[in-house]
Image (spheres, coloured by chain):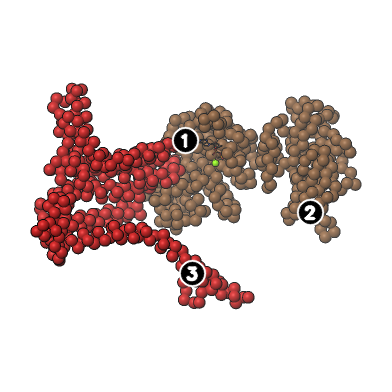
Chain colours: A red, B brown
Amino acid sequence: MIQKGEDLLSGGAAASAPAEPGLVGRGLARLRGRRFLVANILLAPTTMWLVLFMVLPLLVVLVYSFGSRGAFGDVVLGFSLHNYAKVFSPLWFPIILRSFGFAAVATLLTLAMGYPLAYFIAMYGGRRKSLYLILIMLPFWTSYLIRTYSWIVILRSQGVVNTVLTSLGVINDPLNLLNTRFSVILGLTYGFLPFMTLPLYASLEKLDKSLIEAAQDLGASRLWTLLTVTVPLSLPGIVAGTLLVFIPAVGDFVTPDLLGGPDQTMIGNVIQSQFLSTRDWAYGSALSFSLMAILLVAILLYVRKVGAEELG
Amino acid sequence: MTSDEVAIRLEGVTKRFGDFVAVDDISLDIRQGEFFSLLGPSGCGKTTTLRMIAGFEDPSEGSIFLEGVDVDRLPPYRRNVNTVFQNYALFPHLNVEKNVAFGLKRKRLPKKEIEQRVHEALRMVELQERGAAKPNELSGGMQQRVALARALVNLPAVLLLDEPLGALDLKLRRQMQLELKHIHEDVGITFIYVTHDQEEALTMSDRIAVMNRGRVEQVGVPEELYESPATRFVAGFIGVSNFIEGPIERRNGGGVMRWDEGQRVIVGAPAGMSLGNEVALSVRPEKIRLLEMHEQAPEEQCLLLGTVRDVVYLGMTTQYKVDVPVLGRQFTVLEQNVKVASDQTLWEAGERAQLSWHPYHNRVLPPGGEAEHTEEGV
Ligand SMILES: Nc1ncnc2c1ncn2[C@@H]1O[C@H](COP(=O)(O)OP(=O)(O)O)[C@@H](O)[C@H]1O
Ligand SMILES: [Mg+2]
């Protein structure tokens, strides 16, 4: 009996030890094996989906990016780096810079608008929280394209803003709102605001309200509480929100296409035209991959910086 | 009590949430340096009272004076009061030192002084080694001590503690009760301590306010509350009480309740008691003695007849539950085990016994009031 007890113990305590596992250990191992199997079965559809529609296309794009354009706009496979050499030409540099600039400004604006909004809903939403969240997601019920088009109606020279301002006598000649830096950034900010607000809301909602009271109890004013407690503790939401806005905003081509002029071309437009009008798929692929690489580096730097602050 | 000895004064403070009255017309004077407890069952308004003092809730009516100054509309961060929250509310993103330094930094003290005071505060709670740890790396007891240090380091006029030991296990709680008491003596700051644990309140407090349904039932030193409960609720909530009700007759200089077989409960003559009316009394279990049926109780003692139902031997004492038919209720009697020896046994369930005590131990209660609170302990 005693021997058996010891066997049980040793097996349970050191399931990973090389010693022969006891009853408990073997039971655990079997259980773990079954769980592993179940997990894999459940994950299989997602894994297949990702491989089929994410990994494979990316590989195709990667392979293309080393090829060149054929005479009829087809792709001639090969291995050459000339596409990548062209990416860093002075021609595209201002456009890449502009894309990052527009995206950064739009990200800051969505943060500036989304944070108070998310804060309000999380702290004072009460029973209306779900209603407010639905209102935030409401724009998704219309396509991004249509919503962006509607800004043209609002911003053009005979648009809503100009008509109202002219009839009120505030201005004589219509303002040039459309096809400007302003209109593109406005469109990006408008379009991506929910992507900022929702993760911010999620992290502010989780925040223990008694911490805010504790800060005030210790003499912190509302602003100081915000800066030293609320913002640091909602950092995960800020990181998630900024990434969710910044990444797609950098590569966006719908907004600059509809709301911007030739001076507002973003890198997304360039890539799009390589694929659709110039039909240089190889070059478009190289541009896409370069953009991804630059974004990846930027994100890594960003997350590391913010992560370090969070720890310190 | 002169006004400069009063740390906190509540004057007719009432708090309503919609129609619900959470705190009902409380007036209290809490002295400088006092260890004052708010004691009452869960939901009686203790936390709400504390939150009004801290400034997190505004009273619906009445005023709160902190060191003689009306703090109405003063935000929490402008009140010289600090709180130890029940869930500790430590900042998870700051280490222990930064948690403790939080209040001092806000006061823009010189860096050197902050460091020194944080160090002292951590030494006081015996956590000087753990300054760099994050709160979630500490045990519950340690987190509790950080919360205490974080509040005390600011040397507030009043420290508010909301069931600070509620989340700790019994042994740790006992130990922390003693530590808190020592710290209170060392720092000399007024403590307002919220608890629903009467034993904790009795052992730690200079004075206690017993609260029930938003009202203060009685304020007094622990002995006063135990020996002279002012209301039925206090009699039942603090320790265990036996309740007696019945019509009273005149008896030279006082009153008496009489039943058949010579059963009697003798009452003094408290002011305002009109004879012939129903009177409610309470008597503590340890004041009652159990006599054999053949023994003769002195004429001036109270006497009731009963049947022992339940015997719980507790080492130093034995607790009996005794049915008293004339009252239709069960009495609790606590006897010292001084006579228990090899030749003398305890009472046994089913035995008939006489319950006898001196009228001095009867406490007349105001009519009506809360149904009795049944709780074991003390
Ligand atoms: N913000 C609030 N809104 C509505 N009711 C509340 C609020 N805060 C407390 N209450 C109610 O007031 C009563 C007293 O609560 P509380 O002061 O927390 O009691 P205690 O601390 O003595 O357990 C409870 O019935 C509680 O439900
Ligand atoms: Mg409470």
Q: What residue type is labelled 1?
A: Gly
- Taking depth in this image into account, of B345 and A272 the one nearest to the observer is A272
Q: Residue B47 carries which label?
A: none
Asked which secondary structure carries label 3, the reply is helix
Evaluate whether label 2 is on the same chain as label 1: yes
Q: Which quarter of the rendering shows the N terminus of chain B?
A: top right
Q: Which residue is drawn at 79% across and 53% down?
A: B338
Question: Counting other residues with Cα less than 10 Å from the Cα at mark 1, is it few (<14), some (14-19), or many (20 or more)?
Answer: many
Name the spot of residue B252 as percent of width and height, x first. Answer: 85, 29
- Taking depth in this image into account, of B168 and B179 the one nearest to the observer is B168
Q: Marks 2 and 3: which is nearer the front?
A: 3
The number of numbered badges drawn on the structure is 3
Evaluate whether label 2 is on the same chain as label 3: no
Q: Which amino acid does label 3 sit on?
A: Ala
Q: Which mark is residue A29?
A: 3
Evaluate whether label 1 is on the same chain as label 3: no
Q: Which residue is drawn at 33% across and 58% down?
A: A49
Q: Distance between the residues labelled 2 and 1?
A: 53 Å
Asked which secondary structure carries label 2, the reply is loop
Which quadrant would residue B298 be assigned to in this image? top right
Q: Which amino acid does label 2 sit on?
A: Val
Q: Quadrant of ligand 2?
A: top right
Residue B105 visible in the picture: no
- Label 1 CB, ligand 1: below 8 Å? no
- Taking depth in this image into account, of A181 and B157 the one nearest to the observer is A181
- Taking depth in this image into account, of A239 and B35 the one nearest to the observer is A239
| Residue bearing the label numbered 2 | B338
Residue A38 visible in the picture: yes
Name the spot of residue B210 as percent of width and height, x first. Answer: 62, 37
Which quadrant would residue B372 be assigned to in this image? top right
| Residue bearing the label numbered 1 | B55
